[in-house]
Image: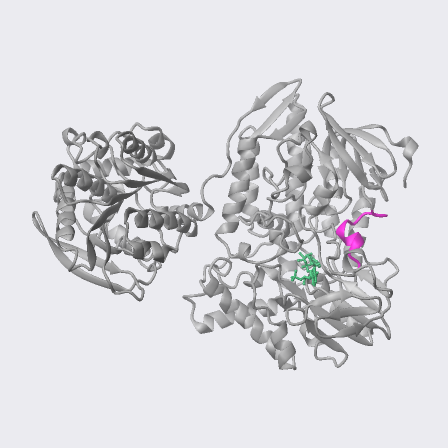
Amino acid sequence: MNKPASVPEHFDAVVVGAGFSGLYMLYRLRQLGLSVKVFDSAGDVGGTWYWNRYPGARCDIPTTDYTYSFDPELEKEWTWSEKYATQPEILEYLRVVADRHGLRSDIEFSTAVTSARWDEPEQGWRITTDRGKEIRCRYYIMATGCLSMPKSPDIEGAGRFAGQVYFTSRWPHEGADFTGQRVAVIGTGSSGIQSIPLIARQARQLTVFQRTANFSIPAHNGPAPAGRLEQLDEDRDAYRHAARWSRGGVPIDPTDVLGGTASESVRRERFEAAWEQGELFGILNVFADQGVNPASNDIVAEMIREKIRSAVKDPGTAEALCPKDHYFGTKRPCLDTGYFETYNLPHVRLVDLRKQPIVSITEDGIETADESFGFDAIVYATGFDAMTGALVAADVAGRDGLSLEEKWAAGPSTYLGLMTAGFPNFFMLTGPGSPSVLSNMTVSIEQHVDWVARCLEDMREEGLETIEPTALAEAGWDQHVQDCGAITLYPTANSWYMGANVPGKPRVFLPYIGGVDAYRQACDEVASQDYLGFRMTGPGGARCRDGVVRSMQPDVAMVLEFVAALGLPPMETLSAADARALMTATAEGRPPGPEVGEVAEGVIPGPAGDLPYRLYRPAGPSGGPRPLVVYFHGGGWVLGNLDSDDPLCRDLCARSGAVVVSVNYRHAPEARFPAAALDAFAAVQWADANAIELGGIPGQLAVAGWSAGANVAAVACQLARDAVGPRISGQLLICPVVDSDMTRPSYAENGDGYILTTALMRWFWDHYADPADRGDPRAAPLRGDLEGLPPACVVAADFDPLRDEGVAYARALEAAGVPARLARARGHTHTSVTMVDVVISGAPVRAGIGEALRDFFPSAELQEQAS
Ligand code: N01
């Protein structure tokens, strides 16, 4: 195939890899009329399916879905013989695709790209191969796969073994015959779990060395499921469309059943159905919250452990095979055919490396801490340097000679997983920061290839020749990728998703877990917004619309979507009574917040009647006095009550270790300005005077509030200062209303679509205060004298219309000599930080709030609790 003399020196594009992604990329680039050369070190097409030929190698996504959709004719002609096709059949499919579209003529096999350098004057790439050639191209595209760089054996003595050595990731083409042999398999990931039952059929003796027990469910392989075939036959386009806009690239209905609230029978029924179905996306969809909620995850994990215990006869072996050190799904689960049952065979033994670690590979076997084993063959099923390994190894250096390895020393940084700043015209197909390994790869591959092709086409139309992400856009995407991971259980595992399987590799969550659908949406938005976050240059000029495509916390976005889908009437169109009823109704069924030591209720004498309060005392061995925090609920002076902010008060109490006293105040329009503020001040005075009875420490009292509650808390501080008492140790103002000026930029940016709207805020003001009163510092504390006020912590949320006034208040306090901490609730709305146990990304913000509260008080006890 290699014809050096006929290879032109210059190509529009060079692609590395002739697997699923490289083949389709070549096809699309040719369609654009570009000259292309594909290099692959393999002897033929296939990528991962060329190399991973170990016994039992199959795909673990139903093959009907693991298929290109770009060639409808092929789709009609090709029939997969099994639900999960074998490696030879998938390889054959890719050969047929290559032949059918005449792709081989542009592919140079058995040729590895050894380096690539960005050539600034040429505005292109200089590439060398292991055959000593140098090639120039404008676009350099890595179709190198996510799991293609085998992890080098990191076991002492690995080179010493004199018998046969096999790697599942580089299996000999002629196969391996283990008949009559004593065989060791090291590793129990997908490759080990698929190959072990088949190796056991041949071997005289099989010993499996397991470091981490893995979750696996039976594949129930056989003919392709009839239901799916029917769906495809009925409307193939609709099916493929649904796959593209699904979470994982296979159309399934995401459940809304929660593990914690489902009945035992529903749990069992859902689990057994998924078990019988034998599909990864099914078992990952037993409960909506199993990926984020440890308790829900445990239910699924325990049911799988039960299955393992019932499949494996020897109780000790069964127990060792039960995964207990990671949440289900956080390491890639496996599909197997008779894996656990293999351990019932008399010649198969499991060695638990947690109990007896490998000391060394020896000339004739393996030595563990307890035993010496002799073997004829050792099979390494030890995995890959996933997602970044092949990219880094390709020796790519971008602008100013910076190598990818240097740039990614602390973990990969990409924009959309497609490109990385400093490396113009360098594309990665299914790169880190894209759904890739968490999705049906073929769907994600087609999406990336289509996006790159469209991008190059758009550029050509506008006379643009180079493209590169901006630092801002890339940093924003990296943050979003990590934010999406952080609300799940995934980062808790030592998985290859986290780079944790390769010694020394930075621990970073590598794929994008926000979903294929959400990801496609983001990529489409970027393209349609003039390639937001990309800098493009060429004869047609230079252009860059800089920005961040996703800066909202992913769970906040989900809540907003959920609320929008409810189709509730805008609050400002309701009467105060109806708005209150609506608020109460929407709070029903939400999580209650953390347990605290004690909750008690009472009344405070207010200026115009009793004010109910609820007291939260922290749990803990010490029943002694604690500092007091007097808290005021949110709700625009119109809505809210002790119940509405109950989960938040529990959370504040649990996190701060202080006694929290949540106090109701009179509401508008029944009691207008300044009733709420005067009630708040009276409550603070009363709490101070009754500190001992409340379980507080006299002289250690802070105020806190959210939204309008933060408004009255801030006002109470000003009134206390003016009245020369009580002494207040600190003020915690969460997304406060501190001014009546609604012209700040945050109103323009966030005034619509984020629950607290400009219209609603106006409605609140109209209910509370006459326009003439809205400049009074008791309504707009930002306009008051700020000197001598207690230290403050002001929380300002990015997507809050009130953000800028909160920031202004913190700055004004500082300017007046008041210590003020400004806590940015990154990616949050006015309400989301307070949604305890609903919006998981709010927890770190509230942890900071708890710390700020503790800092208000000198109490040694609180500081001790914190440490
Ligand atoms: O690799 P792995 P894999 N000493 O990293 C162990 C895809 N895939 O090739 O977990 C002892 O999952 C390691 O132990 P630990 C699929 O996405 C798909 O099996 O690190 N043991 C682990 O048990 C899959 O997830 C299919 O503690 C050592 C195993 O080796 C991914 O590829 C088929 C060790 C490696 O498991 C990778 O799967 C195959 C050491 N020094 C693969 N080092 C399909 O079905 C590592 N291990 C499509």
How many numbered circles are shown? 0
Of residue 485 and residue 66, the one placed in the foreground of this image is 485
Quarter occupied by residue 5: top right
Q: Residue 96 vs residue 671: left or right? A: right
- Mostly what secondary structure, the magenta segment? loop
200 versus 867 height, above or below:
below
- Residue at (86, 73) in percent of width and height: 179
Q: Which residues are magenta?
A: 42-53
Residue pushed farthest left?
A: 608
Residue 36 on image: x %, y %: 78, 33
49 in magenta: yes
- Residue at (13, 36) in percent of width and height: 722
Quarter occupied by residue 135: top right
Of residue 54 and residue 822, the one placed in the foreground of this image is 822
- Residue at (39, 47) in percent of width and height: 845
Q: Is residue 669 visible?
A: no
Of residue 640 and residue 815, the one placed in the foreground of this image is 815
460 versus 722 height, above or below:
above
688 in magenta: no
Q: Residue 326 vs residue 72: left or right? A: left
Q: Residue 89 vs residue 772: left or right? A: right
Q: Residue 650 vs residue 841: left or right? A: left
Quarter occupied by residue 61: bottom right
Q: Is residue 506 visible?
A: yes
Instruction: Report ligand 1 position as a quadrant.
Output: bottom right
- Quadrant placement of the C terminus: bottom left
Of residue 114 and residue 575, the one placed in the foreground of this image is 114
Residue 440 on image: x %, y %: 64, 52
Is the image coloured rainbow, by chain, by secondary structure, or in one colour?
one colour
- Quadrant placement of the N terminus: top right
510 versus 419 height, above or below:
below
